[in-house]
Image (cartoon, rainbow, N blue to C red):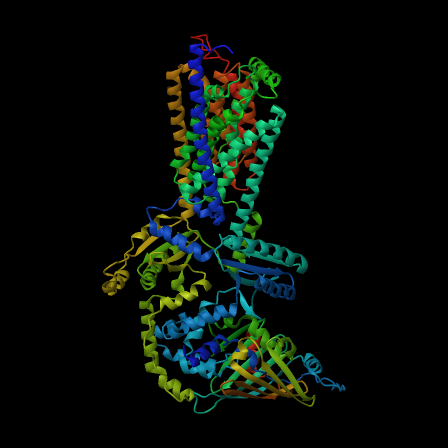
Amino acid sequence: MAKPEPHAQKTDFNQQHKLSRHKKLAWLWLCCQLTLVAFLTFNMVNGLRPQNNFLALLPVDEQRPWVQDTIEAAASSLERRLVFIIGADDKAQAQQAAQKWQQTLTNIDNIEVLSPQASQQAYYQQLFPYRYELLDSQATKWLSQQQADKVTQRAMAQIYNPFAGVSAGELKQDPWLLFRHYMQQRFADNRFDLQNGLLHTQHEHKDYFLIQAKLTSGAYARKSQQVVNDINRQASLLEQTDKVEVLRQGVAFYVTAAATSARNEISLIGGGSLLGIIALIILTFKSIRPLLLCLLSISLGVISAASATILFFGGIHSFTLVIGASLIGVSVDYAFHYLSYRACCNNRWDSIKAAAHLRPVLVLGLASSVLAYGALLGAQFPGLNQVAVFSSAGLIASLLSVLLFYPLLTKTTARHQPIPLANGLLAAIKGYQQSHLGKMVLTTLLLLSALGISQLHFDDDVRLLQSAPAWLKHQEAQISTLTGVSQSQQWMVLTGHDQAQLREAEQTLSRQLQPLVERGVISGFSGVFQLLPANSNLKHNYQQVAKLVDNQAQVLQQNLGLTARPQLPAFTPLNWDKLKQLAPHMPYLWGTLADGEAYSVIMLTGVTDTTPLMALQTLRPQGINHANSANSANQADNPSPLRITYVSRADEISQLLGDYRSDTLTMLLIAYVVVFIGLALKYSAWDSLLLLASPLLASLFAIALPGLFGIEANVFNVIALLLIFGIGIDYSLFLRFHLGQAHAALAVLLAGLTTLLSFGLMAVSTNHGIASFGLTIAGGILASWLLAPLFSTYKNPLQGQQGES
Amino acid sequence: MSKSMLKATLISLMAILNIALVQLSWANSVPAAPVQKPTFDINVLAQLFAHTTRGHGSYQQQKKMSVLTLPLASQGVYYVEPGNTIVWQQQQPFAQTTLIKDGALSQFINGELQPNTKAAGGQAASQMIMALFSGQWQSLSQDFSVNLTGNAAQWQIKLTPKSGPMAKVFSAINLQGQQQVINHISLTEHSGDNTQITLLPANDSPIPTSISRVLNHG
């Protein structure tokens, strides 16, 4: 064996050194990945599952923490409730099915059927002690007009009336029968009526029975989703066997539907992309090793993406996973560049050198994509922040895996070399560049972009981004029509020291709201104070009743022959600790916040103008201050100020989405300018322009798509432009600086196909936001793909030369 | 909460449904041919009632309650059209009228419709009263056990509330009658308080004008 030359020896030593350093890094990276796998496994074993809470995607109201707390408290008080209405043309049929349904629900675990009797009983038990303080409006009127005798007369009539069913017990405790009249009035507008233990109503010649139930665990718990699936199955069964309709309403139905569609979409996007990749690799490289390598870098990308998201956010939302599933199609790009390079290299294959050769361009490509995703970190939307972290981490990990593992696993040359394919492709691109087809494509895209953009309309309503099946929304609307109770999105939120304080404030507030109803600013308002008035009001009633007892006790005693003269019991202020048992039975929102403060919500309907409502926020009525000072001794240590806030969270968030949309556009413009200057400094202004032309025009085409299809555009279409920028620049860079190199053409083709597939599949999502995102990116990628070759041929007229190649 | 208060609560809960516990009798304006069948049961009796078109008469009521020194006595007139209309008009010691029509219950004092009474009972209560007045006790079998003794000429029905809110208040409801006529109703509460109603049909006499007025306006 010949003795190696000293120079060769040095090179060899260098090589050896590089190889061992590379190996060390690869081992280190492997350890990192194994740690992440352990971390993920640990989390999953401990019950970590994708979140489905739509609220978790939305920005938190940081300026008004009390509003945020109230929204969360109200949401958690609502999330377990389930409402069913069984309807049929025939009453007996509906009733029979309703009884069956009640039985079915009782047999399902983790669910509790609320009996209407129990509900009514709870009302009576909790409120009866306050019978001398709660008055119906007729009694209030008579007593204020010194017509106490009419109250006595009314009671007498009932006592004699055999249909009124007054018993000795009632007569003894409430001789003027005040409580029954109060309750009758409060429930007079109930559209449902107790019949044989079921709540019944009629509407448009159909009979309906209402059944209420409660989940024993929160709507987002896995257990609850199983329960809901079970309920849905049983409901379809009942609908078939009994020929009735089973209307359903409840947060859990939405959560389960969202979870199911997210799961399906993740499988579709992820699985579809994966199948596409496998097919492409088998067709192109005709070998098993590239396939295994791709699967390796994709999996490591996904593992890192999930781990990073969990590390940063403590969990992962199914929304992130749906968008994140496209990571598979994007992260495989790096693998394609490497594998194409390897496959097209026919002599002197050195895997370490190959990786080093590709590294600068790949890192540049990664940087542009990560910057594009990273821009989402600036959004105030946790959902988008998660997507940013997930995708960036996934891309970085994929590239690192390609650069570190591939060279060690591909020391030999490729078994199958698709050089004819690559060369053919290159020839096709060159042909396309020189043909008229290119100019026609450019002209068509420009025309379509102009047309689409002229038709473009933005709708930032956040509700569009919530994926809910149409049947569920329809049923919710039907139930609202039947019950007359609908959850309004416009609230006056009150927080304060205790419920008693809030009732006083509501009393004052209602006097301010009433004129707004008359002026048409709102069509109505409702709150717990309508059932349970403020103490000052109760005290006033009590004083009226005291006069009634003074004036009429003797009359009543004599007329009826009562053994004892009616006495006035002592005044009892409402006991909110006990009354909170009623909250689950009420259509009103009130309770205690996590920090112990009291909250309540006045729901507003038919809001036409928010300005007068905002003005109410500064309301500091005397009555409220008075109530405060009365309790000031108790709350001196930690006073919770009374806050009245107009809240229309959906509108506020939609507004934020709109703002974020225009911010993103500005950010995008700045990004283009900065990158233009950067590239111009490095190459030339002309080069820079040509490099940016394709992503820019592709973006214009992509944003025009919703306009062309007549769909409302939203923030997600604009966010997608960031990625088109990031990915499109990639194509330009590769085609411009590796033009003439067959491997680049092959890699860009493969990468484009998988990216197109991933985002194209996303366009079928039931979530309008995700679908918009997918549609825009897919359109943009397709356009950049068609445009990039056109701009990589134009020569700088001044230099008359191309940058590299 | 004390036991008595709990009871009071339950009683008020049932306020309107109690209506159903009061029964009347009325005579047949078109006397049915006496059907003699070997067995006399609830269906046979119901058949007799089914042939009734309408009836009216006067009543006397005595309500005995532990909190009262003397029973409350009242009297008045009534009118019944089975399955359709009931007018119960008290005349002594003061005037008041209850009208059940089209599944709704309304109450008048001095000719004035009382607020809230209409919504209070709802369909359920009115349907229940209607069932009792129409002899359709079978339809109430979900909440009552029904026991018939005697024969068509002299029968007695014992309705024992077995479930539902009624059972919590009343221990027994007894009806006595002859053919399709109810003569006497007695309602007994668990506490021992009771209400006795005696009905005197007067189908041959003209319908009292006070009732016609309600029928024409109601």
In which image quadrant can residue B68 be found? bottom left
Q: Is residue A100 left or right of residue A673?
A: right
Q: Residue at x 40, y 62 (%)?
A: A528
Whether residue A619 appears in this view of the structure is: yes
Q: Is residue B56 above or below residue A237?
A: below
**Which residue lies at the image location 65% right of the left edge and 57% below the top edge?**
A237
Of A405 and A787, nearer the camera is: A405
Where is the C terminus of chain B found, in terms of image quarters?
A: bottom right
Residue at left 52%, top 56%?
A480
Vertically, is A519 above or below A137? above
Vertical placement of residue A282 versus A202, above or below: above
Q: Residue furthest front?
A: A1
Residue A692 appears anywhere in the view: no
Q: Where in the figure is residue A121, as x and y percent of width and height? A: 47, 71
In this image, A71 relative to A743: left or right?
left
Give the image quarter of residue A518: bottom left
Residue situated furthest bottom in the rendering: B70
Residue A237 to residue A363: above or below = below
User: Which percent across, then down, holds residue B138?
Assistant: 65, 77
Q: Residue at x 42, y 66 (%)?
A: A581
**Quadrant in which the N terminus of chain B is drawn:** bottom left
Q: Nearer the viewer, residue A410 or A454?
A: A410
- Residue toward you, A753 or B112: A753
Q: Return the x and y of residue A784 as percentages of the image width and height.
A: 51, 24
Q: In front: A180, or A642?
A: A642
Q: How many marks?
A: 0
Residue A584, percent from left and from top: 45, 62
